[in-house]
Image (spheres, helix red, strand yellow):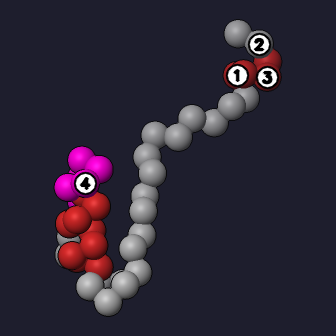
């Protein structure tokens, strides 16, 4: 392994924040659309 490639950072998670009038509806829609897990359905920001 070269020195350059050993210093790279790997991303294991990506978080998406949706700010809108009804974030629950948007989060439900996108979780179904993309097949992603809705991790914080009760979050109130």
Check contact, mark 2 vs mark 3: CB within 8 A.
yes
**Above or below, comparing residue 2 to residue 11 in the picture:** above
Circle 3 residue: 4
Indicate whether residue 38 is drawn in magenta: yes
Q: Spatial distance from mark 4 to mark 3, Cα to Cα?
A: 37 Å
Instruction: Report the predominant secondary structure element of the magenta stretch.
Output: loop
Task: Determine whether, in the image, residue 5 is placed left or right of residue 9.
Answer: right
* Residue at point 24%, 47% (across, down): 35
- Residue 13 part of the magenta segment: no
Gap in angstroms between the C-alphas marked 2 and 1: 6 Å
Where residue 36 appears, as percent x and y from the top left, is 27, 50
**As drawn, 9 above or below 13:** above
Q: Badges 1 and 3: C-beta atoms under 8 Å apart?
A: yes
Name the residue nearer the viewer: 41 or 23. Answer: 23
Residue 1: x %, y % from top left: 70, 10
- Disc number lying in front (4 or 3): 4
Residue at x 73%, y 29% (from the top left corner): 7
**Contact, CB < 8 Å: mark 2 with mark 1?**
yes
Which of the marked residues, 1 or 4, is nearer the chain's N terminus?
1
Rendered image: mark on residue 33? 4
**Residue corresponding to mark 2:** 2
Can the viewer see residue 40? no
Front tag of 1 and 4: 4
* Segment colored magenta: 32-39
Q: Quadrant of residue 19?
A: bottom left
Q: Nearer the viewer, residue 1 or 25?
A: 25
Look at mark 1 in the image and give the residue it sits on. Answer: 6
In-front residue for pair 11/19: 19
């Amino acid at each position: 392994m070269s020195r350059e490639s050993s210093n790279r950072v790997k991303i294991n998670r990506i978080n998406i924040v949706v700010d809108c009038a009804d974030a629950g509806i948007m989060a439900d829609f996108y979780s179904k659309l993309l097949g992603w897990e809705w991790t914080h359905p009760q979050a109130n920001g």
